[in-house]
Image (spheres, grey):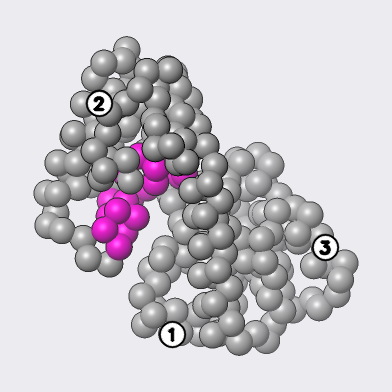
Amino acid sequence: MHVLIVEDNPDIIANLFGYLEPLGYTLDVVRNGNAGVARATAAFHDAIILDLSLPGMDGVEVCRTLRQEYRLATPILMLTARDTEHDKLTGFEVGADDYLVKPYSLPELDARLKALVRRSRNEHVQSVLSFGELRLDAGTGRVTRAGQLLDLTPTGYKILTALMRAAPTLMTREAVEREVWGDSPPDSDALRTHIHTLRQVLDKPFPYPMLLTLPGTGYRLAAPGET
């Protein structure tokens, strides 16, 4: 699981790394609100741990900006030392998915993160995803671009689902591999081969490409006018 930590307290950061990394988490960290917005919108994360009290832009503003301006759907777990109903309601109103008051239990934080990610993925499974000309109906397995049915391989379907869920944010190669193969990815050429096959179906018959590659980094979907 790839998690972004937006926290300025070095002791808390060290505790989170010390507990979560041995459990298999991949952690990304920034120490202020502006950097949090930039990092959250520049790369795919399964969840965000967001401190309420941050230098510059506080956690409430970060959450509001991600939800309202960027329409980012990544689950957000908010951390705060403020244990009042008003603060919790404010966090939920701006788009936080869950709330933990310091000091908190690290096993509980782990459990809540996993629950948020499960809930998020289940919601996507039960819904229709759309981005630009693309429409993916997880209930029927049908994928269309501009109304034309796409004949995807099972792996291509998994890759496209992950990219649509993240769109238009970039997904690293590692993040795509985790979505498709979990913790046991195949050799390094396998993803490249599946991306090539997906691109033949997704882009070749159409006037402009939607599946973009950032060499050495990852992949993302682009809307019309971005290419």
Distance from label 3 to label 1 (Cα)? 30 Å
Outermost residue toward the top? 207
Whether residue 168 is visible, yes or no, is: no
Residue 49 x %, y %: 57, 67
Mark 3, other Cα within 10 Å: few <14 / some 14–19 / many ≥20: few
Q: Quadrant of residue 179?
A: bottom left
Front residue of 33 and 108:
108
N-terminal label among 2 and 1: 1
Three-letter code, disc 1: Gly
User: Which mark's residue is nearer the viewer, 3 or 1?
Assistant: 3
Residue 165 x %, y %: 47, 44
Distance from label 3 to label 2 (Cα)? 46 Å
**Which residue is at a point 72% across and 79% down the rendered structure image?**
101
| Residue on which the image places disc 3 | 89
Three-letter code, disc 2: Val
Quarter of the C terminus within the rendering:
top left
Residue 112 x %, y %: 58, 73
Residue 166 x %, y %: 46, 44
| Residue on which the image places disc 1 | 18
**Magenta segment boundaries in residue numbering:** 159-182
Residue 131 versus residue 214 in the image, above or below: above
